[in-house]
Image (spheres, rainbow, N blue to C red):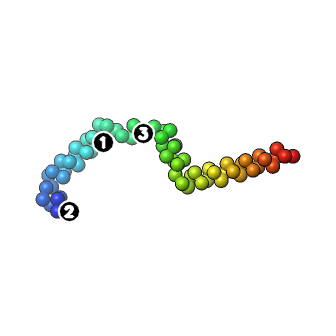
Amino acid sequence: MDYARANPFKLVGVSAVAGAAVVVLRPWRMVSVSALLVTAVKSSGLSNTLITMLSSFTRHADIHSRR
């Protein structure tokens, strides 16, 4: 807060440069869909759900293969 009071124009200038860099570089285009899927799968909640679903599916398949 003291920096903003002492150098308000410098802070606005840095913010403008950072905003322009985001517009020019478009970082959201650098992230692929597969990277987003990998990130989603690595999250603990989704991975636990997938493990539960897969284990119930394999148990269900084992029961039907024994008949």
- Which residue, given by chain and number where applicable, does mark 2 sit on? 1
Q: Residue 40 at x, y = what percent?
A: 51, 48
The number of discs equals: 3
Tell whether 46 sits left or right of 14. right
* Nearer to me, 37 or 66: 66
Q: Amino acid at mark 1?
A: Val
**In the figure, residue 5 lies in which quadrant?**
bottom left
Tell whether 64 sits left or right of 22. right
The quadrant the N terminus occupies is: bottom left
Q: Residue at 25% across / 41% down in the picture?
A: 20
Q: Residue 17 at x, y = what percent?
A: 22, 43
Q: Residue 15 at x, y = what percent?
A: 23, 49
Of marks 1 and 2, which one's residue comes earlier in the chain?
2
**For the residues marked 1 and 2, what is the alpha-carbon distance in whole angstroms?**
24 Å
Q: Residue at 52% across / 52% down in the picture?
A: 43
Label drawn at residue 31: 3
For label 2, the crowd category at 10 Å Cα-Cα, with few meaning under 14, some 14 to 19 and many 20 or more, is few
- Contact? badges 2 and 3 (CB < 8 Å): no
Q: Residue 26 at x, y = what percent?
A: 34, 38
Label drawn at residue 33: none
Of marks 1 and 3, which one's residue comes earlier in the chain?
1
Q: Residue at 31% across / 37% down in the picture?
A: 25
1 or 3: mark nearer the eye = 3
Q: Residue at 60% across / 54% down in the picture?
A: 48
Q: Amino acid at mark 2?
A: Met
